[in-house]
Amino acid sequence: MADAESDVRKLQVANARPDDAGRGLARLSRTSMNALGLAEGDVVEIVGRRSTPARAVLSYAEDEGLDILRLDGLQRANAGAGSGDFVEIRKAEAKPATRVVFAPAQKNLRLQGSSEALRRTFGMRPLVAGDVVSTSGQQRVDRGDLPPQLRQMLNAPAYALQEVRLAVVSTAPKGIVQITPETEIELRPEYEEPKEARRADVTYDDLGGLGVTIDQIREMVELPLRYPELFQRLGVDPPKGVLLHGPPGTGKTRLARAVANESEAQFFHIAGPEIMGSAYGESERRLREVFEEASANAPSILFIDEIDSIAPKRGQVTGEAERRLVAQLLTLMDGLEPRQNLVVIAATNRPEALDEALRRPGRFDREIIIGVPDQPGRREILGIHTRAMPLAEDVDLDELARITYGYVGADLAAITREAGIEAVRRIMPQLNLEEGTVPPEVLENLSVRRDDFIAAHKR
Ligand code: ADP
């Protein structure tokens, strides 16, 4: 019998590399593996505020000697721990499951899928009810120009163009289980409110080329939201407003969502242009309502997209309605208590067009600049968007990163989506649409090739 010290180890959580994301791995040092009596591939249980299983694998060479555990964003959510937190890790066992029920982990996502596809995808993964897991080798097609039957088939887990996140609704037996050839698998078609809320949305792993930016926003927003007592103790007021500026499509919205998820804060979204132009007094009322709701649900992040449309320089404002809306926003910002655990993040691509009063102390007094990604940044973004794609051998993401100079994240996401569609077009002649299923051999051979990416790039 091992003594208590070698049964459990406390390790500090760090982010997974983008290439590992979605795979359910726990990367830890050889020292930790030895101390816990683990071999690579063994099942471990990770306990933070919640607990989740993973498969242990050896850390990257450069992490050796560090007492860290690398987990991806979904695993951090499943374990109830953020980067930098300490969690307990111990050896565990996965019992063979007789039954596992999955459901889409997102609202507005209807899925139809075969149990066989899910068995293939999650066969190696230890699972526990309540976890949110990401499918891999999957694609979601939402292009209107494909025949509906084909779209439906290709939306099923296991061949979606994008990753699909599923919640493990229940398992039999309970506890950590593993899917076997005998397991009965059910996929409920629609989102079910999990009993315990888990983050299924974007995390820091879903942002490429923004390493330094993520550090900045963690410090400014995540730390104060997660550890308000720390700031109170120090007598420091955390920021109320942070301004993100950068060109469209560089990931500002995604970053705001990710920081909300990672801080376990509620996320509220106001689209600048949308709130404008309502009936007299209506825009202000809506703005007030969102602020109230966000305060009532704190910790929360209120994201205002295209803030320049709400609060342009007052000299340039013509209408009375605009002037009143700017004034309302200023009042709402000033009315926020620093201890309220609400951070307003605003995004703009024209900071020079903003009313200067907005940037005074106590309002949007912090700024983060998000630029167009450089080549390594583009490579990371491409890695993220092709994470779940079956890529042919000839696809060279470094090459693609090289030839996409000037492209922002949104452009790169569009290219990978288009490349997926190209691949689907290629297999269409082999499909019998009447049958309603894609033959397994066609699926096995479905991959996205270099020429698909090149064709998508040329468009
Ligand atoms: P912005 O708010 O800056 O206009 P978004 O966050 O809305 O940009 O990005 C639009 C889409 O582009 C995202 O949903 C994502 O698919 C992709 N994207 C943009 N930037 C990145 C990034 N840095 N990493 C990964 N994907 C990105």
Image (tube, rainbow, N blue to C red):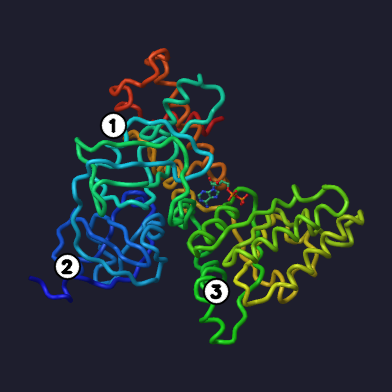
Give the distance between the C-alpha atoms of the residues marked 3 and 2, in whole angstroms. 34 Å
Give the distance between the C-alpha atoms of the residues marked 1 and 2, in whole angstroms. 34 Å
Give the residue drawn at x 47%, y 28%. 421
Q: Which residue in the protein does label 2 denote?
A: 36
Between label 1 and label 3, give the one nearer the viewer.
1
The local secondary structure at tag 1 comes to: helix
Looking at the image, residue 157 lies above or below residue 424: below
Give the residue drawn at x 56%, y 83%. 232
Location of the C terminus by quadrant is top right
The local secondary structure at tag 3 comes to: helix
The quadrant in which residue 119 appears is: top left
Q: Earlier in the sequence, mark 1 or mark 3?
A: 1
Q: Is mark 1 within 8 Å of ligand 1?
A: no
Q: Earlier in the sequence, mark 3 or mark 2?
A: 2
Q: Is mark 3 within 8 Å of ligand 1?
A: no
Q: Which x, y percent locates residue 133?
A: 37, 48
The local secondary structure at tag 2 comes to: loop
Q: Which x, y percent locates residue 182?
A: 19, 36
Q: Which x, y percent locates residue 101?
A: 34, 41
Q: Residues within 10 Å of mark 1 (few under 14, many from 20)?
A: some
Q: Which mark is residue 224?
A: 3
Give the residue drawn at x 79%, y 59%. 311
Q: Residues within 10 Å of mark 3 (few under 14, many from 20)?
A: many
Mark 1 is on which residue type?
Glu
Mark 3 is on which residue type?
Pro
Q: Which x, y percent locates residue 88?
A: 28, 69
Which one is nearer the viewer's eye here, 436 or 371?
436
Q: Which mark is residue 116?
A: 1
Mark 2 is on which residue type?
Leu
The quadrant in which residue 296 appears is: bottom right
